[in-house]
Amino acid sequence: MTKYILDLTLTSDEFIFTVPSLMASAAVCLARKILVSEEPSWTLGLSYFSRYAMNDLIPCMQSMLDLLIKAPDCKFQVGENYYKKE
């Protein structure tokens, strides 16, 4: 899921000047929030090793979530078949 979120950002000019480590951290946090809703999506360990607090990730995560919502209607659908489970 994290890789799919990051692949969606490749076609968006909104992320051109975003620091790659912030994008990676935000994608991990968003994927954990979507897939593992019972546990905290951003732990102290993740915060320590990434050097990003949850508050730093929220704007980037919101932009990524908007991309996920728009993904089915996006003209760049190459990755759709690539990520489908068989």
Image (tube, rainbow, N blue to C red):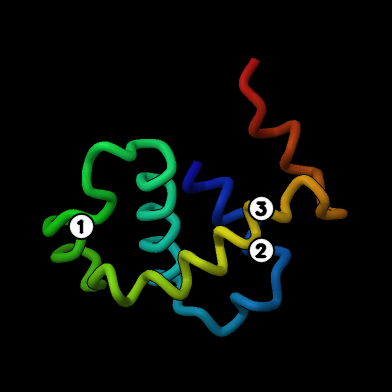
Spot the residue most to the bottom.
17
Q: Earlier in the sequence, mark 1 or mark 2?
A: 2
Reading the image, the residue beneath label 3 is 69
Quarter of image, res 26:
bottom left
Query: Which of the pair 48/56 is nearer the observer?
Result: 56
Location of residue 16 with respect to 85 vertically, above or below: below
- Badge 1 density bin: few <14, some 14–19, many ≥20, Cα 10 Å: some
Judged left or right of residue 23, residue 49 is left
Name the element at disc 3.
helix
Question: On the picture, is 38 further left or further right than 65?
Answer: left
* Up/down of 1 relative to 15, above or below: above
Q: How packed is label 2: few (under 14 Cα within 10 Å), some, or many (20 or more)?
A: few
For the residues bearing labels 1 and 2, Cβ distance under 8 angstroms: no
Q: Vertically, is 65 above or below 34?
A: below
Q: Nearer the viewer, residue 42 or 50?
A: 42
Residue 75 position within the rendered picture, expressed as x and y whole percent measured from the top left: 87, 54
Which one is closest to the eye, mark 1 or mark 3?
3
Disc 1 marks which residue?
46
**Quadrant of image for the C terminus:** top right
What residue appears at the point 66 percent right and 53 percent down from the top-left corner? 69
Q: Residue at x 29, y 74 (%)?
A: 55
Q: Earlier in the sequence, mark 2 or mark 3?
A: 2
